[in-house]
Image: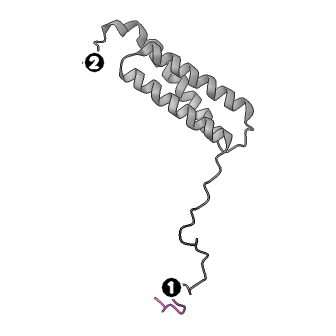
Amino acid sequence: MPPLTGPRVPPRGSRELRPRGETHQPQKISQAQKQVDEVQALEKQAGDLVRRNDLRGALQMYEECKAEIEDTLDGLPKDDVSYPTLLERKKSVESKIIKCKEFLPFEYFLKAPN
């Protein structure tokens, strides 16, 4: 291995550092990303309802998620960064709706958690 010719540490002042006490600028979040975050929150709430054996409430929440996703997809161009994520999430929500509907007739067999 050849020896390094330059200094290992960059000279002072070669990097621009933030002055002490100054906070960094928050990243700007696009409207589509905000809607993706809202959909994730709704989907999580629906999952919690499923875990508590409230399938009818979960179905309603998943339907709301699906509607939000479709509204968001209508306004997005196909080359947007969030577009593939939303399509994948839409397929996931649709499959969860199907699973809940399949299990709904057996809901009366479930016992309420203590």
Quarter of the figure with residue 47: top left
Q: Secondary structure at mark 2?
A: loop
Depth order, front residue of 64/28: 28
| Boundaries of the magenta span | 1-7
Q: Position of residue 24 (x, y in %)?
A: 58, 61
Q: Residues within 10 Å of mark 2 (few under 14, many from 20)?
A: few
Lower sequence index among marks 1 and 2: 1
> What amino acid is labelled 2 in the image?
Pro
Q: Position of residue 35 (x, y in %)?
A: 62, 35
Taking the view exactly as shown, the residue that stands out farthest to the left is 114
Q: Position of residue 8 (x, y in %)?
A: 50, 86
Q: Is residue 2 magenta?
A: yes
The residue to which callout 1 is attached is 9
Main secondary structure along the magenta-highlighted residues: loop
Labelled disc at residue 60 = none
Q: Residue at x 41, y 13 (%)?
A: 103
Q: Secondary structure at mark 1?
A: loop
Q: Gap between marks 1 and 2, in whole Å?
A: 61 Å
